[in-house]
Amino acid sequence: MTKSEILKMCDHTLLRRDMDSRDMRLLCDQAEKYKTASVCLPPHFVSSARKYGGEKLVICTVIGFPNGYSTTRAKCDEARDAVENGANELDMVVNLSMLKDRYYEGITEEINSVKKICGARILKVIIETCLLSEEEKITLCRLVSESRADYIKTSTGFEKGGATPADIALMRSHCAPHIKIKASGGISCFEDAEEFIRLGAERLGTSRLVALAERDGLC
């Protein structure tokens, strides 16, 4: 794959707590320049990014981020606000407390409640693989497959680990064919990105690849 093809599969991401409006505008400008799949930014900046980038910009934001233990009602309120502000895609953190309690029905209900608000917009479910056993990863692959979500996503990038090749391979093996995979966290070079894609990822969450493209003068 070419670097340009890989960038088109990236959610160009900035979720730093201290980012400001200048950071937001730069993120949007870079996304347009490199034709990334979307820009992924905090809910606070969704409305501003929509006004700045217009309808041509695909905006992704996060729900229940980064811990996932908000109530279902709170996540639904966040999702509704994001949609009203112009978000096209939502990345929601799964409730790992429900997983540990084996309240599997609650996980599926929560995902579907947020998806109902999304409508035709894309919903990605972040499972935070670095905190899970292999059995728990497989369980969440099944639950996401049984839900109405569009993607399963490895990581928030705010925990001790991010995407690994082994996790992408496992997720592709245990998710239904219609569930797409997003690898996120720790993707530091185009070679890593291409490996994740080869293993089954259809979207990448990263900011480093655009930084490398800028450094190398890729247009």
Image (cartoon, rainbow, N blue to C red):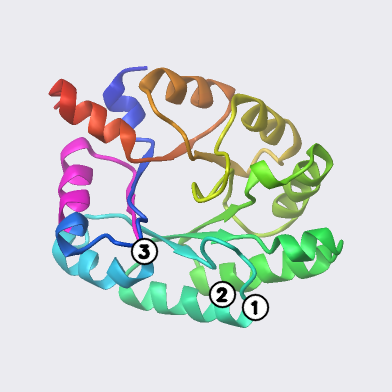
Question: Which stretch is magenta?
Answer: 25-41
Q: Label 2 belongs to which residue?
A: 75
Q: Which of the labelled discs sits on residue 195, or is there none?
A: none
Q: Label 1 belongs to which residue?
A: 71
Q: Mark 3 vs mark 1: which is more N-terminal?
A: 3
| Alpha carbon distance from label 3 to label 1 | 19 Å
Tell me whether the residue at label 1 lies in contact with that at label 2, contact meaning CB atoms closer than 8 angstroms.
Answer: yes
Residue 127 screen position, x and y as percent? 64, 51
Residue 27 screen position, x and y as percent? 22, 50
> Is residue 30 rendered magenta in the image?
yes
Query: For this rendering, which residue is in front, 146 or 12?
Result: 12
Number of the front mark, 3 or 2: 3
Quarter of the figure with the C terminus: top left
Q: Mark 3 vs mark 2: which is more N-terminal?
A: 3
Residue at the spot x=71%, y=31% of the render? 170
Name the side, left or right, on which 195 lies relative to 138.
Answer: left
Q: Residues within 10 Å of mark 3 (few under 14, many from 20)?
A: some
| Alpha carbon distance from label 3 to label 2 | 14 Å
Name the side, left or right, on which 205 lies relative to 131.
Answer: left
Q: Which of the labelled discs sits on residue 42, or is there none?
A: 3
Name the side, left or right, on which 174 lies relative to 53.
Answer: right
Question: What's under tag 2, amino acid-wise?
Answer: Lys
Residue 165 screen position, x and y as percent? 60, 25
Q: Residues within 10 Å of mark 1 (few under 14, many from 20)?
A: few
- Disc 1 on helix, strand or loop? loop
- Disc 2 on helix, strand or loop? helix
Q: Residues within 10 Å of mark 2 (few under 14, many from 20)?
A: many
Question: What's under tag 3, amino acid-wise?
Answer: Pro
